[in-house]
Image: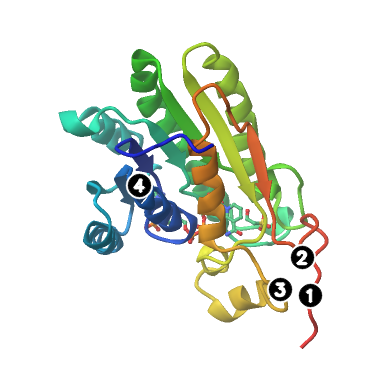
């Protein structure tokens, strides 16, 4: 049975697009109040309007780059009283850059992936979780990836960042044992979002090819899984959930219809 998360406070990173945006809407449907963050403020404002026009929940939208440790710390420590008691943290912000062989890859892309997917997730976790520990309740839900279970050609650094998310998830769960704070990871396969457009630096044609001949997951499919984790009763935890398109067996094998 679902445990109600109505009136809970849910903090989502990377809510301007894809999985994060779908999570915001899915949690709003459950009656949760939302702290939505990301770097594109106009998109956050648009999402705030969409949610407050359609659901009876409160939304706080704040421009936040998770790579900026000071910005993360001052935002979390400066939250207004009524937003301080964060119940659920969805660590979703992340990106891939390129699919080049490691030995000739763009180092800037590595920095971006490591700073966002690993260090950004760590900063947000470091500043949000102490409040959860103090209150003896909370739930951290990380968005990992199938790339955290397997490595593929050209994905050396992206896969390494998602393997890091898997390790951080496991360790944090042990650190928090007995403190009333749960830790889950939702690890999707191919999801059609802006992920591939970002990975290929805005090349939409190349991005489209990734999903040619298949029915990929949507952000909403992943949000369903995240909400499922969040709505387990407090004595139960989903440690890890791998969510794949039905036509994708693993990172190497995808069944594609020929056009
Ligand atoms: P999108 O590109 O659609 O969304 C990525 C989100 O991350 C955006 O809201 C973006 O917001 C945010 N983001 C990126 N960098 C930063 C930053 N420095 N600070 C704050 N927010 C940031 O991709 P997805 O929705 O697909 O990606 C979400 C997560 O899902 C990522 O962690 C990704 O690795 C993971 N994932 C994706 C899969 C896929 O196939 N799409 C599969 C498995 C996992 P903004 O640019 O406004 O800051
Ligand atoms: C993003 C999906 O298949 O490129 O995590 O690893 S994949």
Q: Nearer the viewer, mark 1 or mark 4?
A: 1
In screen coordinates, is 78 left or right of 92?
left
* CB-based contact (under 8 Å), mark 2 and mark 3: yes
Q: Position of residue 73 (x, y in %)?
A: 30, 31
10 Å crowding of disc 1: few (<14), some (14-19), many (20+): few
Towards the viewer: 201 or 6: 6
Q: Secondary structure at mark 1?
A: loop
In screen coordinates, is 70 left or right of 170?
left
User: Which residue bears the numbered disc 4?
Assistant: 65
**Which quadrant of the rendered structure holds the C terminus?**
bottom right
**Residue sitting at 42 percent across and 61 percent down?**
17
Q: Secondary structure at mark 4?
A: loop
User: Which residue bears the numbered disc 3?
Assistant: 214
User: Is the CB of mark 2 within 8 Å of ligand 2?
Assistant: no
Q: Which badge, 2 or 3, comes first in the chain's sequence? A: 3
Q: Which badge, 1 or 4, comes first in the chain's sequence? A: 4
Q: State whether residue 239 is above or below residue 132.
A: below
10 Å crowding of disc 2: few (<14), some (14-19), many (20+): some
Report the Cα–Cα distance between label 2 and label 1.
8 Å
Q: Position of residue 219 (x, y in %)?
A: 52, 60
User: Which residue bears the numbered disc 2?
Assistant: 247
Residue 245 picture quarter? bottom right
User: Can residue 79 be spotted in the picture?
Assistant: no
Q: Which badge, 2 or 1, comes first in the chain's sequence? A: 2
Residue 99 picture quarter? bottom right
Towards the viewer: 102 or 12: 12
**Which quadrant of the rendered structure holds the N terminus?**
top right
Q: State whether residue 187 is above or below residue 245.
A: above
User: Which residue bears the numbered disc 1?
Assistant: 256
User: Is the CB of mark 4 within 8 Å of ligand 1?
Assistant: yes
10 Å crowding of disc 4: few (<14), some (14-19), many (20+): some
């Amino acid at each position: 049975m679902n445990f109600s998360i109505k009136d809970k406070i849910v903090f989502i990173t990377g809510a301007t697009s894809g999985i994060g945006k779908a999570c915001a809407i899915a949690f709003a449907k459950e009656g949760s109040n939302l702290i939505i963050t990301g770097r594109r403020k106009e998109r956050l404002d648009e999402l705030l309007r969409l949610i407050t026009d359609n659901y009876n929940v409160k939304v706080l939208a704040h421009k936040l780059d998770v790579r900026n440790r000071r910005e993360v710390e001052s935002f979390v420590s400066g939250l207004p009283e009524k937003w301080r008691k964060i119940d659920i943290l969805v660590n979703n912000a992340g990106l891939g850059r390129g699919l080049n062989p490691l030995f000739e890859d763009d180092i800037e892309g590595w920095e971006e992936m490591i700073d966002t997917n690993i260090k950004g997730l760590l900063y947000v976790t470091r500043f949000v979780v102490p409040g959860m520990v103090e209150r003896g309740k909370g739930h951290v839900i990380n968005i990992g990836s199938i790339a955290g279970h397997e490595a593929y050609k050209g994905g050396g650094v992206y896969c390494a960042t998602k393997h890091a998310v898997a390790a951080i998830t496991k360790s944090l769960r042990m650190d928090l044992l007995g403190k009333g704070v749960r830790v889950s990871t939702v690890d999707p396969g191919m999801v059609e979002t802006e992920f591939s457009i970002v990975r290929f630096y805005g090349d939409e044609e190349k991005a489209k090819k990734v999903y040619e001949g298949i029915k990929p997951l949507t952000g909403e499919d992943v949000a369903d899984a995240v909400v499922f984790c969040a709505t387990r009763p407090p004595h139960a935890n989903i440690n890890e959930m791998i969510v794949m398109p039905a036509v994708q067996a693993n990172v190497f094998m995808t069944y594609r219809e020929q056009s």
